[in-house]
Image: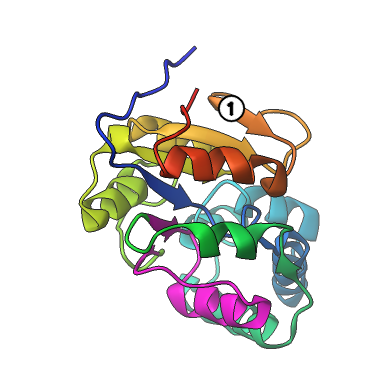
Amino acid sequence: MISEPRPSGAKRYVLFDVDGTLIDALDNQRLVWRTWAARYGLDPDEVHRVALRTRPMETFAQVAPDRDPHECLAALHALEDEDVRTGVYGAFDGAAELLGALRPGTWGLVTSNYEHRVRGRFARTGLPVPEVVVDAAAVTEGKPSPVPYLRAAALLGARPEECLVIEDAPSGVRAGLSAGMAVWGVNTATPVDGVHRHFATLSEAADAILAFATGSGSPA
């Protein structure tokens, strides 16, 4: 059991994952990877299984080692950009109200996606974009490395123990824990291993997140 960091003083910061946490786009990701796999004659279920736990270039190395990885990445990016423009997805219940209630400069986004897609999806779903967005292009190591969350904290001027991570995926949870931050899990039926608190939905977590952010609630 990992003990939860205790924030000192009044400073509190909240770092959100995006896909699966704020935006309900998991079916979109599955469809994109299935379409990509079909284009290369690969097993779509196996490709998606690998893609869930690795970054794209690592996925290509495992599922299509004989293919040009840059060509593979260009094809994937085209599919993902098209999904941002035309795909059907939405924000999770309570996301807009929660983000709108947080003070500017006290929260950020940490995503394995790219910022232009985040901005495109947020524009379509009415979510506000914070000052700090750490995307796949901003770091050399992705989740489960702690680097993305530590980068976001540094940009906010925060210490790790002052940060609360909101995640839905095991790799993101491990990243937050490795960064020395409190980690709450949302949008899963059962708790992801290691989370300090678990909520079945983001909306159920909203009041507790706001209480933490304003200093009136504990991360425990």
Residue 190: % across, % down: 74, 29
Position of residue 137 in the picture relative to residue 196 (left or right)? left
Task: Report whether residue 25 is seen.
Answer: yes
Which kind of residue does numbered mark 1 sit on?
Answer: Arg
Q: Residue at x 33, y 30 (%)?
A: 180
Above or below, comparing residue 42 to residue 8 in the picture: below
Q: Residue at x 55, y 70 (%)?
A: 67
> In the orientation shown, which residue stands out farthest toward the front?
216
Task: Report whether residue 65 is seen.
Answer: no
Tally the marks.
Answer: 1
Q: Are there few (<14), some (14-19), or many (20+) residues within 10 Å of tag 1?
A: some
Above or below, comparing residue 64 to residue 172 in the picture: below
Does the magenta run of residues contain 115? yes
Classify residue 182 by image quadrant.
top left
Tell me the element at label 1: strand
> In the orientation shown, which residue stands out farthest toward the top?
1
Above or below, comparing residue 175 to residue 5 in the picture: below
Residue 5: % across, % down: 36, 24
Does the magenta run of residues contain 197? no
Q: Residue at x 58, y 56 (%)?
A: 98
Determine which residue is flagged by label 1: 197
Residue 177: % across, % down: 41, 31
In the image, 27 versus 186, the foreground residue is: 186
Above or below, comparing residue 190 to residue 30 in the picture: above
Position of residue 138 in the picture relative to residue 14 (left or right)? left
Q: Residue at x 55, y 56 (%)?
A: 59
For the record, the magenta segment spans 107-134
In the image, 166 versus 9, the foreground residue is: 9
Position of residue 158 in the picture relative to residue 41 (left or right)? left
Position of residue 124 in the picture relative to residue 105 (left or right)? right
